[in-house]
Amino acid sequence: MRILVLGGTWFLGRAVAQAALDRGWEVTVFNRGRSGAAPEGARTVRGDRTIAADLARLAGEGPWDAVVDTSASEMAPRDVLAGARALEPVAGRYVYVSTVNAYRRWPSEPLTEDSEVLDGPPHADADYGRLPDDWNGPDWYYGRQKAGAERATTAAFGEDGAVILRPGVILGPGEYVGRLPWWLRRAACGGRMLAPGAPDKPIQPIDVRDVAAFALDQAAARGGGAYNCVAPIGRETMSEFLTACVLATGGEAQLVWAPDKALLDHGVQQWTELPLWRTHPGVWKIDSTRAQAAGLVCRPLSETVADTWAWLRDGGMPVEHPRWAEHGITPEKEALILAALGRK
């Protein structure tokens, strides 16, 4: 099996490239060379996806049985379309990693793959979906961009040649966003540790290695379609997640649960100040039975937590990314909320 990974040097892209090598596949990675090196054994082609000459040169390195696109998170749909069209003559199928943000009703309602996807044409530029500064409604810019990129993939490879993967939250070794690393480092500090919401609230993060394995399975399969790449609904809870963080780091922290209303009253920013905490009713109700039927297997979240802590303790460093700084409540604000809870 010959595979082309667009990206291939960090987090999901690197996990895809490494897993393909572990399967004995021939792996080519295409990137600009700004975010580290590809796994040993992969062939690297340097270039910029937004430059037509670079795409033409890349196509000359083919053919491939499949392309796995992990590097289009900040790319306009028209650039995804140009790249997919350039590669279609030399690739059998195209696996595009999108996001649940492409759904119109996420995170407000439960979702399946048949739920409505946001508008977003395949030829849209990077300005499509931007909102005026005085807009007070939902911000669908990112989702519209990803929905347009999904349509770009299908426009180039057709319904049978394009596979769309829609992960929710991806965690695991190499994470660059900073959600799980923040919780682990907070747990390692010990003491009374603010825990958000209801302990039994279900959550659905997925391990980066499980997304990578499923992407490769789909690269080798036949037929197209869309799949929600999340852990099964209700399998694990916020309490189990945070307890795993405490145990992995030595068990010194004591969880103090704060109701949603208390956190909202203190102005805690959902999704970032206390990562993975969000009050919207559909945030962790994403159906993935179609993906499971197609072979998606999700390891226990406790294994993801333990492996990520081991990676951090071994000196693992994520690729620098501005989203890292968005995550985590300050010690001062956490102490203020804990003190208020203690007075009740």
Image: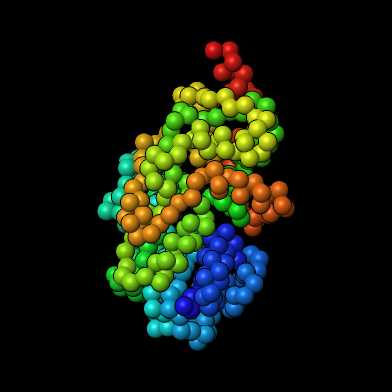
Quarter of the image containing the C terminus? top right
Residue visible at 36% across and 66% down?
A: 163
Q: Is residue 23 left or right of residue 33?
A: left
Q: Residue at x 32, y 68 (%)?
A: 224
Side (left or right) of 14 relative to 286: right
Residue 134 percent location from the top left of the image? 43, 42
Q: Quadrant of residue 325?
A: top right
Front-lying residue, 33 or 197: 197
Front residue of this view, candidates 92 and 96:
92
Instruction: Give the residue drawn at x 68%, y 54%.
Output: 317
Determine the residue positioned at 32% across, 42% down.
110
Residue 327 is drawn in which quadrant? top right
Residue 192 in the figure: left or right of residue 60: right
Q: Position of residue 97 (x, y in %)?
A: 44, 61
Residue farthest along the top direction in this orientation: 343
- The way the protein has been coloured in the rendering is rainbow
Residue 270 sits above or below residue 2 on the image = above
Residue 334 seen from this side: no
Task: Answer above or below: position of 264 versus 285.
Answer: above
Q: Position of residue 145 (x, y in %)?
A: 41, 59
Q: Whole-percent x and y of residue 212?
A: 49, 61
Q: Is residue 195 visible?
A: yes
- Please tell me in which quadrant of the rendered image residue 234 appears: top left
**231 up-or-down from 51: above or below:** above
